[in-house]
Image (cartoon, rainbow, N blue to C red):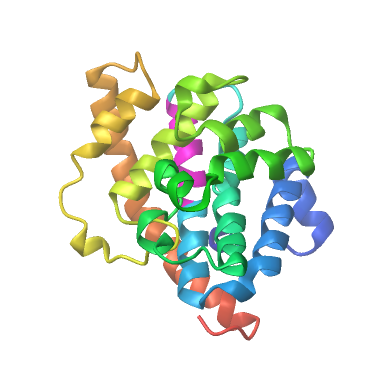
């Protein structure tokens, strides 16, 4: 992560610093991106990572605000929540089903995915999670983050990631569509998404959480943009 540069000195150090499970999740996500990356432009991969990393950071922030017992689990779930979207677009490209997908999908409209491809990224994500033996609560997020009410394992965790994902989308930080945040306009839709994802939060708590997320967003998006470019140039990859 950009904010960890200079602190991690070795793989062993990374495992100790991040924890075995979080390191495993990050490695699996990275391997998947490297494997599928040939199907995407650098801008598209950058948008995927920014969306995933920001969703992870905001998920952890929401979890801490709500006193969720394992906020690090919220980070992991947020990081990996759109794994199915990345795999689904690759499959669509290979089968020639990609026409009309770019503007309809973006990892956001599962209904559009089903209409165009016959399957959605939440279902694909759940298959990936089970194949890689991820914890049940992470698989639950992969499968239900667009419909938290359908959660089968950890409704609170699914709602947290769903809220963070909605925040990113409302702010124009979304997978596969590189969109200027200056053109996103009003973000009124997020409060409604927050209430749907986290029922019982209350208006006062909701407004306070929104303010916290706005501040976290401004800090993190600058860190990710600057750090991502520096990290890529450091390993010889054009940013």
Give the quarter of the image for residue 175.
Answer: bottom left
Q: Position of residue 220 (x, y in %)?
A: 41, 55
**Is 59 in the magenta?**
yes
- For the question of whether residue 67 can be seen, the reply is no
- For the question of whether residue 12 can be seen, the reply is yes
Compared across the picture, whether 84 is left or right of 206 comes to: right
**Is 173 in the magenta?**
no
- Residue furthest to the left in view is 186
Q: Residue at x 75, y 43 (%)?
A: 19
> Magenta residues, as a range?
54-65
Q: Position of residue 142 (x, y in %)?
A: 59, 38
Q: Residue at x 41, y 41 (%)?
A: 111
Question: In terms of secondary structure, what is the magenta stretch mainly?
Answer: helix
Compared across the picture, whether 207 is left or right of 64 comes to: left
Asked whether 235 or 120 is in front, the reply is 120
Compared across the picture, whether 217 is left or right of 128 comes to: left
Q: Position of residue 113 (x, y in %)?
A: 46, 48
Quarter of the figure with the N terminus: bottom right
- Residue furthest to the right in view is 12
Asked whether 201 or 111 is in front, the reply is 111
Q: Is residue 167 above or below residue 32?
A: above
Asked whether 230 or 236 is in front, the reply is 236
Q: Position of residue 210 (x, y in %)?
A: 28, 35
């Amino acid at each position: 992560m950009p904010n960890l540069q200079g602190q991690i000195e070795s793989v062993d150090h990374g495992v100790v610093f991040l924890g075995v499970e979080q390191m495993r999740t990050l490695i699996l996500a990275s391997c998947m991106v490297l494997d599928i990356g040939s199907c995407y432009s650098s801008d598209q991969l950058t948008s995927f990572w920014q969306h995933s990393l920001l969703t992870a950071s905001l998920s952890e922030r929401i979890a801490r605000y709500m006193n969720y017992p394992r906020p690090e689990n919220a980070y992991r779930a947020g990081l990996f929540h759109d794994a199915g979207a990345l795999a689904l677009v690759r499959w669509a490209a290979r089968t020639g089903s990609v026409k009309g997908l770019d503007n309809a999908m973006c990892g956001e409209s599962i209904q559009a995915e089903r209409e165009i491809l016959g399957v959605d990224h939440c279902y694909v994500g759940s298959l990936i999670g089970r194949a890689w033996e991820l914890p049940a609560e992470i698989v639950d997020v992969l499968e239900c983050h667009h419909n938290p009410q359908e959660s089968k394992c950890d409704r609170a965790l699914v709602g947290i990631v769903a809220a963070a994902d909605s925040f990113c989308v409302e702010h124009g930080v979304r997978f596969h569509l590189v969109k200027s945040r200056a053109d996103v306009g009003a973000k009124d839709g997020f409060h409604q998404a927050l209430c749907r994802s986290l029922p019982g939060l209350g208006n006062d708590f909701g407004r306070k959480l929104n303010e916290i997320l706005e501040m976290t967003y401004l800090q993190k998006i600058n860190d990710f943009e600057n750090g991502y470019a520096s990290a890529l140039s450091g390993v010889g990859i054009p940013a």
